[in-house]
Image (cartoon, rainbow, N blue to C red):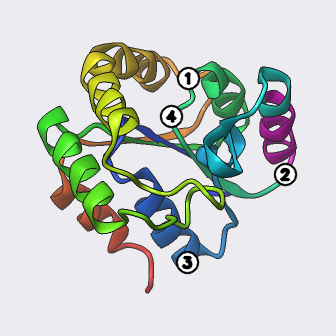
Amino acid sequence: MKRVMIVGGAGSGKSTLARRLGKRTGLPVYHMDHVHWKPNWVERSKAEKRDLCERVHALDQWIFEGNASDSYAERAERADTLIWLDLPVHIRMWRVINRCWKYHGKNRADLPKGCTERFNLSFLKFLKFVWATRHSTREKVLKIYQNPPHRMDVYRFTSQETLNRFMQRFQE
């Protein structure tokens, strides 16, 4: 386990898992949200995103978490491990709301500076997006999970309990 691709819908726990796994394995952690966003919620250009992803992919070791499906193929090509957090949408929606409440007006570690959580119209649009893309996002990951581009370890977790059992194999 040297290059780990963590995917799943918003609120599935990708960033939390990446931090925990990074701490336990010593692998460097990269967040797709840092690739996607500049400070203050300014979206990067496609070229910038592609360049930043390629820089991470070129490294020998990484945990790269995030849900940008346009980079799935390249990440999967380089990854030796795929971890898919396939939690039910109602749990994920609750987590997104709870996360916004917890970090309201603050910056999360997995986001660039100035990307603070807010209960506003953008947040409501994001919730709508999470709901609207619940099937399409899952289908994209399912294709890689069922037919990986090469021999790789693949894990799919449909509950927090099974993920916690998996994490027990790594020393704290």
131 w.r.t. 64: above or below:
above
Name which residue lies at 65% across and 76% down: 26
User: Is 45 or 147 nearer to us in this picture?
Assistant: 45
Residue that numbered label 3 is attached to: 23
Q: Residue furthest front?
A: 120
Mark 3 or 4: the one toward you: 4
User: How far separated are the C-alphas under marks 1 and 4?
Assistant: 6 Å
Across and down, in percent, residue 141 comes to 43, 24
Q: Given the image, on which type of amino acid does mark 3 rest?
A: Lys
User: How far separated are the C-alphas under marks 3 and 1?
Assistant: 26 Å
Q: Given the image, on which type of amino acid does mark 1 rest?
A: Ser
The numbered disc on residue 58 is: none
Q: Residues within 10 Å of mark 2 (few under 14, many from 20)?
A: few
Disc 3 + disc 4, Cβ < 8 Å? no
Mark 4 or 2: the one toward you: 4
Residue that numbered label 4 is attached to: 67
Image: magenta residue range:
50-59
Secondary structure mostly taken by the magenta-highlighted segment of the chain: helix
Pick whichever of labels 3 and 4 is earlier in the sequence: 3
Q: Mark 2 falls on what kind of element?
A: loop
Residue that numbered label 1 is attached to: 69
